[in-house]
Amino acid sequence: MLTILPENIHPDPWDLYDETYAGLDVAVFPPDDDDEELPAAGAVAWRIAEPDAYDAEEGAFAGTLQVFLDQVATEEVRALVIGCWEQAYDTDSSAIVNLLAENAKRFPALRAIFLGAIQSEEAEISWIQQSDVTALLTAFPQLERLEVRGGTGLALSPVRHENLRVLRFETGGLPAEVVRAVAASDLPALEHLDLWLGIDNYGGDSTVADLAPILAGDRLPALKHLGLQDSDHQDEIAAAVAAAPIVARLDVLSLAMGTLGDEGAEALLSGQPLSHLKVLDLRHNYVTDPLAERLRVFVGDAELDLAERKERDDWIYVSVAE
């Protein structure tokens, strides 16, 4: 069975999805052994990665993907994990996006794509060269889950997509134009949205104002999980969230991985009730003990995650940047 909603609300930023993805066991392509029998195409999630990507020549991944198209019954494929392509710190993902979009008719069962399941040894998250990923939504109207790692060069245009249920961007700096494109998109089926906003030094130049349409929720009627994470403006985001209409509809709210401190905690405490939540995720924060105790009372029976509390000193930092 394909699991569309993420299994873990605390994803590892360096998870390669080489064991499971979307509730399916992962098969790696190309296999280590050329004589290895391939599994049934629809029984697994396919992780496609370029062997020795650091030394591979330009166009190598496109060649590997073409071999996959030739050897696998793509009409049965339900989930793709795109791993490292050749020199991903220097070569963007556009050729991969275009090749998938051009062959969309060959993937009628495809429901989940992760673009950029790359480990730090291959390219740090803010070194990964991404591209305009809009075509992955427009070419695959039945897609239900799209996840992208890496914000450098990342672009998105506003879309209407009837079936997307999960949209996640893992970055150390999410471009403002991408935030605004998500905010301007009509996504009536979307249940889970994660934006790792990052910091300006790595391209995370969005403002709280860019988030306003998301927080209003008019274009996201089905949303149950909202993550506005990894920001060095986490206190400002918390203040906006405290009065946001969408919060009353959520099961999970994550303001984790950023620089949330007592100012943001006070804003949450002064805002709308949060006891209806199943989870309030504030991991990696700078909240002091008194405010932490007040938050625990304030959220009632909701699960409150305040792990990785840090001392505020001259240097505060987000969880994922470079």
Image (cartoon, rainbow, N blue to C red):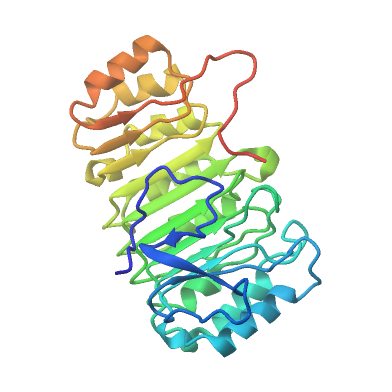
Q: Is residue 172 left or right of residue 266?
A: right
Relative vertical location of residue 80 with respect to residue 225 in this rendering, above or below: below
* 113 w.r.t. 176: above or below: below
Q: Is residue 150 above or below residue 68?
A: above
Residue 155 sits in quarter: bottom right
Q: Nearer the viewer, residue 264 or 120?
A: 120
Which residue is drawn at the image coordinates 52% and 27% (left, top)?
259
* Apparent side of residue 12 relative to residue 199 in the rendered image (left or right): left
User: Could you say where residue 101 lies in the image, as x and y percent from the top left?
Assistant: 55, 80
Picture quarter with the N terminus: bottom left
Q: Furthest-top residue in view? A: 290
In the displayed structure, 218 sits above or below 53; it is: above
To which quarter of the image does residue 69 belong? bottom right
Name the spot of residue 48 as percent of width and height, x first.
58, 70
Residue nearer the viewer, 3 or 128: 3
Can residue 186 be seen here? The reply is: no
Query: Is residue 234 among the parts visible in the rendering?
Result: yes
Image quarter hosting the C terminus: top right
Which residue is painted at 40% across and 84% down in the image? 76
Q: Identify the residue at image location x=64%, y=14%.
A: 314
Count every numbered label the image shows and give the total.
Answer: 0
Image coordinates for residue 211, horizontal then vertical, percent: 45, 45
Look at 40% across and 70% down and name the residue there: 160
Residue 50, x across and y down, in percent: 68, 69
